[in-house]
Amino acid sequence: MTAGERTVRLLPSGPWTFGKARFVAANSNEGWAHKPSKRLLDLAIAVPAVVFLAPLLAVVALLIRLDTPGPVLFRQKRLGYCGHPFKIFKFRTMVVQEDGETITQARPDDRRTTRVGRWLRAFSVDELPQLINVVIGDMSLVGPRPHATAHDLFYARLIPGYQLRQEIKPGMTGWAQIHGLRGATPTVDLMARRVDFDVWYANHASLRLDAQILLRTPLEVLRRRNAC
C-alpha cells in the first residue's frame, strides 16, 4: 500500500448505537444543530442555489458524459444522523464506483480519477449535487462530512467517540474542512484529528458559527489544501 492510500474492508459489526453520550452545548444556542431554524436556513440557501447553479450543473454533467463512459452521478451509501443510511450524490470523478465492503480512499494523482474529474475534485465542484441531499433532508449545509459506511465501521473501532459525530446531521462543509482537514486520511491519527474538530462543532454549533463556516468555505476551496 502506498503512502496516501487506505483500503478499508467492511468488518462484521454489532448494532450502530447512539445516545450513550449526548452533547452539552458550550453556548447559549443549545440544540442549534437540531433546531427547525437550522433546517430553514438549509432550505433557504440550498433551494435557490440549485436553481441558480442549474446551468453549471448541466454543463458539468455533459462534460462527464463526453469524457468517460458511465453515469453522471456517483451515489454511495453513507451513514447520517444517528446512523441512518442514505445515498449521497456526487458528480462521478472516477472510473470506479465503489460502494461495497472494500473502498479505497482517493489520493493525490489517483489513476482512477478521470480527466474532468481531476478538475472537479480540485475545486470541490463534484460535491455540488449534495445540495439535493440537503433539500431532501439527509444532510445539512454545515456539519461533519459523511464518510463511506465501510470507513465509518472501520474507524469506529479505532477512535473512541467516533460515533458522536453522527449525533447531528452530516454537512457539505464543516469546521474540520475550513481548517484544512479534508482529503485522504492515510493514518488513523489524521482521522482522529478530523473527528475532534467534528465533535467540537457539534458541541458549539450555532447560527453564528454556521455563517462563519459557510463564508470561509469558498476561500478554503480556492486554497485547495489537501484536495485530491
Image (cartoon, rainbow, N blue to C red):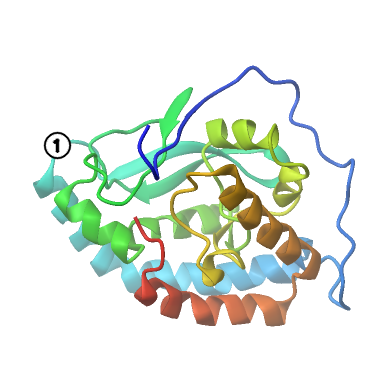
Residue at 56 percent across and 54 percent down: it is 145
Q: Position of residue 89 (x, y in %)?
A: 42, 47
Q: Quadrant of residue 156?
A: top right
Q: Quadrant of residue 208?
A: bottom right
Residue at 86 percent across and 57 percent down: it is 23
Q: Which residue is mark 1?
A: 69
Q: Position of residue 181 (x, y in %)?
A: 53, 61
As helix, strand or loop, the secondary structure at mark 1 comes to loop
Residue at 38 percent across and 43 percent down: it is 3
Of residue 42 and residue 111, the one placed in the foreground of this image is: 111
Of residue 140 and residue 22, the one placed in the foreground of this image is: 22
Q: Which quadrant holds the C terminus?
A: bottom left
Q: Residue furthest top?
A: 12
Q: Which quadrant holds the N terminus?
A: top left
Q: Residue furthest left?
A: 66
Q: Position of residue 133 (x, y in %)?
A: 51, 52
The amino acid at mark 1 is Pro
